[in-house]
Amino acid sequence: MKFQPDHLAGTNVITRHGPGELWVGDQRFEHSLLVPWVGTVQRWDPATVQQLEPAHFDAVLALKPELLIFGSGPRIQFVSPALMRALIDRRIGVETMDTAAACRTYNVLASEGRSVVAALLLAPT
């Protein structure tokens, strides 16, 4: 029995994650990412929750998601709603979880055709 959901053609799929690396499709990354359901995967500058600023979440707005999945690193860490004010004001849903869970959740939502963006923190090793 196949448990992994199928993905829609043209959507970004996170295929692997581990300490110090994320894979989207067959491309390996060693830094934090913004992964939109479609389009170009983008480098995201913060590596830790402590480095986050409102402008980091403003970058998500240009991708026009209905939902943001925020991967906070190896363990769940919530950030102040003030940092995400621009998303909240535009009624964009935000879910926070550790980065591994965020990758799995993002894949399920993207496979359903949802306009979702994963903002994934990946501290360099």
Image (cartoon, helix red, strand yellow):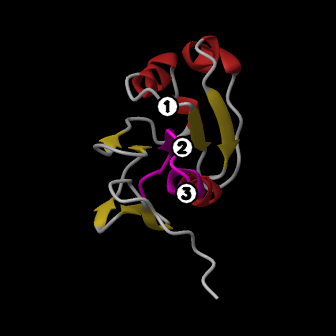
Quadrant in the picture for the C terminus? bottom left
Q: Is mark 1 on a helix, strand or loop?
A: loop
- Give the spatial CA distance, label 2 vs label 1: 8 Å
Q: Where is residue 72 in the image (x, y as percent from the top left)?
A: 61, 44
Q: Nearer the viewer, mark 3 or mark 2?
A: 2
Q: Residue 10: percent from the left, percent from the top?
A: 32, 54
- Disc 2 target residue: 114
Give amino acid for label 3.
Cys
Q: How many residues crowd mark 2 within 10 Å: few (<14), some (14–19), many (20+)? A: some
Residue beneath label 1, please? 65
- Horizontal arrangement in the rendering, residue 43 relative to residue 49 (left or right): left
Magenta segment: 107-125
Q: Residues within 10 Å of mark 1 (few under 14, many from 20)?
A: some
Q: Where is residue 92 in the image (x, y as percent from the top left)?
A: 60, 24
Residue 124, quarter of picture: bottom left
Quadrant where the N terminus lies?
bottom right
The quadrant holding residue 2 is bottom right
Q: Indicate which disc, 3 or 1, sits on the residue closer to the N terminus.
A: 1
Residue plotted at (65% across, 58% down): 101
Check disc 3: other Cα within 10 Å, few if <14, some if 14-19, many if 20+.
many
Q: Is residue 32 magenta?
A: no
Amino acid type assigned to the residue bearing label 2 in the image: Arg
Q: Residue 103 carries which label?
A: 3
